[in-house]
Amino acid sequence: MKKSTEKTRILTEALPYIQKFYNKTFVIKFGGSIMKNLEAKKAFIEDVVLLNLVGIKIIIVHGGGPEITERIEKIGLKTEFIDGLRKTDREVIKVAEMVLAGRINKEIAHLVNRMGGKAVGLSGKDGNLIKARKKIIYKKEKEIDLGYVGDVEMIEKKILVDLIDLGYIPIISPIGFGDDGETYNINADFVASAVSSELKTEKLVLMTDVEGLYKDFKSKKGFITAMTSAEANELIESKTIEGGMLPKLSCSVAAVEKGTKNVHILDGRVEHSLLIEVLTDKGIGTMIHGGEVK
């Protein structure tokens, strides 16, 4: 009886959130080391299918850096990172496209379909979805050539709107095309941010392998449950947030400033963290918003 009462309480708590987010669009970035956690991956797919079945429109953008590295090393190529970005020559971009747009993309789409959803796997080259430009970075005023690494220049949103309006879940690999005819590998967080910004979605959710943001990451003190985009900018400018979380925070701020209502940084290692964050009162991650919580 106690278990039944608890289940009823959880469902009752979720109801107003289901009503609030019905027919709204969420963009979810999924990737990195959490993709190798089979139980967490299964729970994530279950969450996605459930949210879609109750009327929430879902778009997934995935990464796959560890798998690319594994494949590169297996065939004897070298990989080099500069400021967290993989230097990508012509051979490496071929491997990246094969791993991202081929194996990982189709695997996620297949899992969603097996669990009762309707997924369509897309590369950024399909339907001219992601137009890219070569990424330029500088170190000590010297231009660094990263090869075939890109920034998002444009998102062709019509194909996504058409798919989600028909009840499909687009699964996007972060491969773009340039005016120069070349293929570019793009950071998946920034692709997710760009898609969310273009569609002005209800939520952008970044699934990662940390609990969320802390004021002091080293000591794990001062967990941040919510903050404004202005407060997030202060953390960036003060260099309080560094390393791998810096690009996530930067793209979160960009998404909010371009029309996304809320961004959530969640621990993908926690099973069903997506449902806990979206459909319960407490949530478990860090939310970034424009000012007033919506």
Image (cartoon, rainbow, N blue to C red):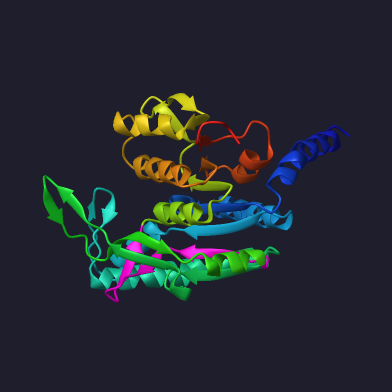
Looking at this view, name the residue that lies furthest to the right: 1
Horizontally, is 130 left or right of 58 in the view? Answer: left
Task: Specify the quadrant that holds the N terminus.
Answer: top right
Residue at (26% x, 58% y) in the render: 135
Q: Please tell me whether residue 138 is drawn above or below residue 159 in the rendered image.
A: above
Residue at (62% x, 64% y) in the render: 164
Q: Please tell me whether residue 273 is drawn above or below residue 158 in the rendered image.
A: above
Task: Specify the quadrant that holds the C terminus.
Answer: top right
Residue 19: image location, x then y, percent:
75, 45
Residue 30: image location, x then y, percent:
50, 54
Q: Please tell me whether residue 44 is drawn above or below residue 239 in the rendered image.
A: below
On the image, which quarter does residue 20 sit in? top right
Residue at (61% x, 34% y) in the render: 283
On the image, which quarter does residue 131 sit in? bottom left
Q: Is residue 167 magenta?
A: yes
Give the residues in magenta. Answer: 166-186
Residue 110: image location, x then y, percent:
59, 69
Horizontally, is 71 left or right of 261 in the view? Answer: left
Would you say residue 106 is visible in this rendering?
A: no
